[in-house]
Image: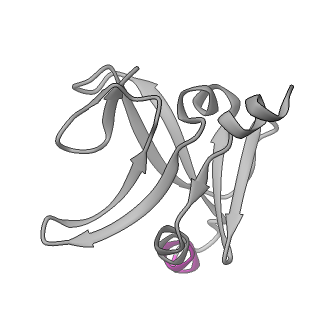
Amino acid sequence: MGADAKTAMKVDMTEAAARRIAKIVSGEAGKTALRVSVEGGGCSGFSYKFDLVETRNDDDVAIEKDGATVLIDDLSLVYMGGSVIDFVDDLMGQSFQIRNPNAVASCGCGTSFSI
């Protein structure tokens, strides 16, 4: 895999997301990471799923920052390459948001997208 392909498959998280993930995981007994996956469905074709998990699977890619770990499986990484995971706290509420350069459309809820 060339350097461009490796960069395209990279997913990052902001400091705000890392802080929030670390806080959430520390409050959940036995949980060690936040798993982000892509599933078919949602109002735009694909949707993101967030789960707190205890263990890492063999096909997971781990993104670590400031004591927080995000796990993404190989299949989901294909759809998420180049994305940034952020945590937003604004007038609309608190939520994890994924800025995905592969998405050509997304929905108002911020958890569904199409490629």
Q: Residue at x 53, y 45 (%)?
A: 36
28 vs 67, left or right, is: left
83 vs 70, left or right, is: left
Q: Residue at x 33, y 22 (%)?
A: 41
76 or 14: nearer the viewer = 14
Counting labels gives 0
Q: Which residues are magenta?
A: 22-27
User: Of helix, strand and loop, which mostly describes the magenta segment?
Assistant: helix
Against 83, is 66 above or below?
below
The image quarter in which residue 92 lies: bottom left
The percent coordinates of residue 76 (x first, y second) are 58, 31
Q: Is residue 25 magenta?
A: yes
The percent coordinates of residue 81 (x first, y second) are 60, 35
Q: Is residue 80 magenta?
A: no
The percent coordinates of residue 40 (x first, y second) are 40, 20
115 vs 69, left or right, is: left
Q: Quadrant of the C terminus?
A: top left
Q: Residue at x 51, y 52 (%)?
A: 84
The image quarter in which residue 54 lies: bottom right
